[in-house]
Image (cartoon, rainbow, N blue to C red):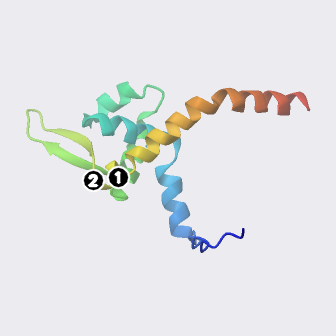
Amino acid sequence: MPDTAEPAERIQISTHHRELLDQVLDKWSLQVLDELCEQPLRFNELRRAIPVVTQKSLTATLRRLERNGMVDRVIVSSRPIAVEYRISALGRSIQDLIDALFHWSAENMPDVERARARFDAED
């Protein structure tokens, strides 16, 4: 019996879409968003939560995420004045996708490692 459902309209991925995906799905952005989904953090707290990221990379990542509306930079009125980073409503809207990517990678890592070993053995 033929499928009578209309085919889904294919989404056209423009340069702007690719740029956004590159900026949101890079390794540091995913980790920063994952940490900030849990709670607001100051810069040094983020550095401790993601110890392998350099200060320069974390600064660039936070600025990029803030520019894209994923993260809010909030001045906390304390002594001394501090800056805190919080997940924005837009950033929170992709939390389920981030969780799904992390879950997928954990679940499929053994298969990936076997595929890599087979590939490397052919060289």
Counting from the top left corner in percent of width and height, residue 55 is at 41, 35
User: What is the crowding at mark 2: few (fewer than 14 residues within 10 Å), some, or many (at least 20)?
Assistant: few
Q: Is residue 76 left or right of residue 5?
A: left
Residue type at the position of mark 2 = Ala
Does residue 56 show up?
no
Counting from the top left corner in percent of width and height, residue 42 is at 25, 34
Farthest-out residue, front: 1
Q: How many marks?
A: 2
Front in this rendered view, residue 8 or 25: 8
Q: Name the residue tied to disc 1.
A: 93
Residue drawn at point x = 46 percent, y = 51 percent: 24
Q: Name the residue tied to disc 2.
A: 89
Mark 2 and mark 1 in contact (Cβ < 8 Å)?
Answer: yes
Residue drawn at point x = 41 percent, y = 45 percent: 96
Residue type at the position of mark 1 = Ser
Does residue 69 show up?
yes
In the rendered view of the protein, which quadrant contains the N terminus?
bottom right
Q: Is residue 117 left or right of residue 87?
A: right
